[in-house]
Image (tube, helix red, strand yellow):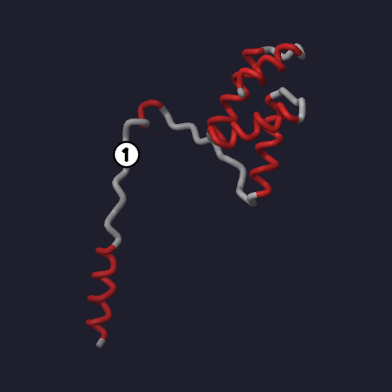
Amino acid sequence: MIDALLAQAVARGHVLKTTINLLIECLDAYGQSELHHAIEEAIQNKSPHPEGVRQILTRRREQRQQPPPLRIAIPEKARHYSVKPANLSDYDDIQTAEENDHE
């Protein structure tokens, strides 16, 4: 599928490196499945350009009434950290203790 899109893009004179970079951005923002559907539709519409693919992705997202994807830059030095979620049931115990004190 991607090969067909790239071949059509090159045949129309689009720069391959730019096309690939824009498609990678779409992949990062929307995921593999959505990108696949958008590429398939772009080929059917004879619109083999990443901007056409991006328009399809945007339209599909808007039809699902989802917000636009946000890119968050995480510094390399912070990528190996993970945050363990707190056990919120501890707060339930506090609430119960306070209720018992007021009775």
In the image, residue 81 sits, relative to residue 92, either above or below, namely above
> Looking at the picture, how far across and down is residue 96, in whole percent?
26, 76
Q: Residue at x 69, y 33 (%)?
A: 41
Front residue of 26 and 73: 26
> Looking at the picture, how far across and down is residue 18, in whole percent?
65, 16
Helix, strand or loop status at disc 1: loop
Quadrant of the rendering where the C terminus is positioned: bottom left
Q: Residue at x 61, y 22 (%)?
A: 2
Report the amino acid beneath label 1: Ser
> Looking at the picture, how far across and down is residue 48, in whole percent?
72, 23
In the image, residue 96 sits, relative to residue 33, either above or below, namely below
Q: Quadrant of residue 13?
A: top right
Binning the other alpha carbons within 10 Å of mark 1 as few (below 14), some (14 to 19) or many (20 upward) gives few
Front residue of 77 and 71: 71
Direction from residue 92 to residue 56 in the image, left or right: right
Front residue of 29 and 93: 29
Quadrant of the rendering where the N terminus is positioned: top right
All told, the count of numbered labels is 1
Q: Which residue is mark 1?
A: 82
Q: Quadrant of residue 97?
A: bottom left
Q: Residue at x 56, y 34 (%)?
A: 29
Q: Residue at x 66, y 30 (%)?
A: 40
> Looking at the picture, how far across and down is residue 80, in whole percent?
32, 31
